[in-house]
Image (cartoon, rainbow, N blue to C red):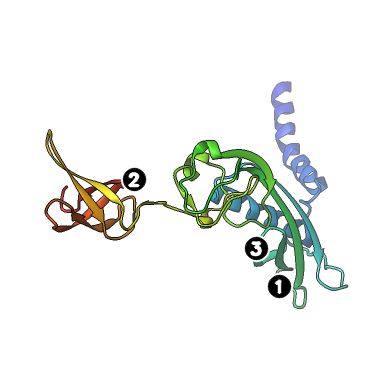
Amino acid sequence: MLLLCLSRKWWSVWPLAYAAAVAAAPAAAVPSMEAAVAEAAREALHLQAERDGLLAPEIEVSVSPVGTREAPRCAQAPLIETMENRFASRMRFAARCPGVEGSRTVFVVRGSLSAEVVVAATSVASGKPIAASDLMLDRRDVSSVPDPMSDIEEAAGQAALRPLRPGQVLQKRLLSAPVLVKRGDVVVIEARSGPVQVTASGEALEPGKRGEVVRVRNVNTGKVIRARVMEAGTVQPADMP
């Protein structure tokens, strides 16, 4: 009987104790505008690093409001608007307090993004296919470098659109598939049908990259055919499967 009375008393007191504990617990802190903007900038840089496939990215940000007015404190989490985030070294965000007129504040964020990226280990001539041995990984600040890359295999085999100097960070926009066949080159025309392979000598009438179709003159017959570039100095009739 005594146990039953104690049990009933505990159940009657517990809701009051729980309510008191909840009331005494501190409310979740509302982040300042600066903190909210810094978090948005870090998230943007993380997404950029992920998009570019960068290895071991490291991010730092510094936030400062535009002008001399101090950023207001919000009763609720600030709303963040991205104005400019193309380059980590200088981004712009705006923050405002929900439902509060005149609270919009613009911030400049100076960020730093470094990662293990592909750089030239030696000088590479423009248009020359890049070998894996011409490249290496090195940690660099790529805050102001568009399209960096961290995969040596992705860059190997491509050609630089301009000469590369030792230590230069490779950028995807500066790489292209190399021209494997030039106009006037003597090429081998390979025709396959099952186990049978027939070859002939030809002259390329226009330049081509791997997979491109170019005009080739068969030097034995004088006939001009359309041929697909397979590798340097080798083409295959374009109508072959």
Q: CA–CA distance between discs 3 and 2?
A: 42 Å
For the residues carrying marks 3 and 2, which lies nearer the camera in this image? 2
Q: For this view, does 132 lie left or right of residue 58?
A: left
Per the model, the C-alpha gap separating discs 1 and 3 is: 26 Å
Drawn side of residue 189 relative to residue 155, left or right: left
Residue at 51% in and 57% down: 161
Q: Secondary structure at mark 1?
A: loop
Residue at 76% x, 43% y is 16
Residue in the picture at 74% in, 22% down: 2
Identify residue type, mark 3. Answer: Asn
Q: Position of residue 64 (x, y in %)?
A: 82, 63
Of the pair 33 and 82, the residue shown nearer to us: 82
Q: Which badge, 3 or 2, comes first in the chain's sequence? A: 3
Q: Mark 1, mark 3: which one is toward the viewer?
A: 3
Q: Which residue is mark 3?
A: 85
What residue is pinned by disc 1?
A: 99
Quadrant of image for the N terminus: top right
Q: Amino acid at mark 2?
A: Ala
Q: CA distance from mark 2 to mark 1?
A: 65 Å
Q: Nearer the viewer's eye, disc 2 or disc 1? A: 2
Is residue 31 something one can see in this rendering? no
The residue labelled by disc 2 is: 232
Which of the marked residues, 1 or 3, is nearer the chain's N terminus?
3
| Front-most of residues 154 and 79 | 154
